[in-house]
């Protein structure tokens, strides 16, 4: 990997990707907490409504991270990486 690509990768422009941890905490970490809730929104068990809300939340978080990746120039970085690796793999 060339130094300029490595510098871009470690520049801290990817901190927004830590938001992708939130859906895992939502679904896995909080499941025991919501498992015993007796409230029934829309006539559904609360745990089922919680899971459906998690699907919507996860989709929104992934869309936001994808948009932030484009704003920070990750596509340009990937293109530069592909060019650099293609040049080094040819004899």
Image (cartoon, rainbow, N blue to C red):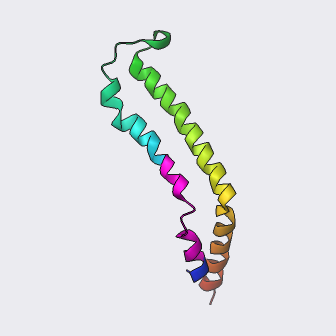
The answer to whether residue 2 shows anywhere in this view is no
Residue in view at x 30 percent, y 19 percent: 36
The image quadrant that residue 26 belongs to is top left
On the rendered structure, is 35 left or right of 8?
left
Q: How many marks?
A: 0
x%, y% of residue 8? 59, 72
Would residue 40 be seen by someone viewing this image from the given angle? yes
Q: Is the magenta region chiefly helix, strand or loop?
A: helix
Q: Is residue 47 above or below residue 64?
A: above
87 in the magenta segment: no
* Residue in the foreground of this view, choosing between 82 and 50: 50
Residue at 52% across, 70% down = 10
Look at the picture and state if 57 lies above or below 16. above
- Side of 29 where 66 appears, left or right: right
Q: Which residues are magenta?
A: 5-19
Residue 61: x percent and y percent? 56, 42
Quarter occupied by the N terminus: bottom right
- Residue at (69% x, 67% y) in the render: 76
Picture coordinates of residue 37, whole percent (x, y) = 34, 17
Task: Give the residue at the far bottom of this rendering.
Answer: 91
């Amino acid at each position: 990997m060339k130094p300029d690509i490595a510098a871009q990768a470690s520049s801290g422009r990817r901190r927004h990707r830590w938001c992708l941890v939130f859906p895992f905490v939502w679904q896995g970490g909080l499941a025991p907490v919501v498992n015993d809730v007796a409230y029934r929104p829309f006539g559904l068990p609360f745990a089922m409504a919680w899971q459906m809300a998690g699907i919507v939340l996860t989709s929104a978080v992934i869309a936001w991270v994808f948009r932030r990746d484009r704003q920070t120039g990750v596509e340009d970085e990937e293109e530069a990486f592909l060019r650099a690796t293609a040049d080094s793999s040819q004899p």
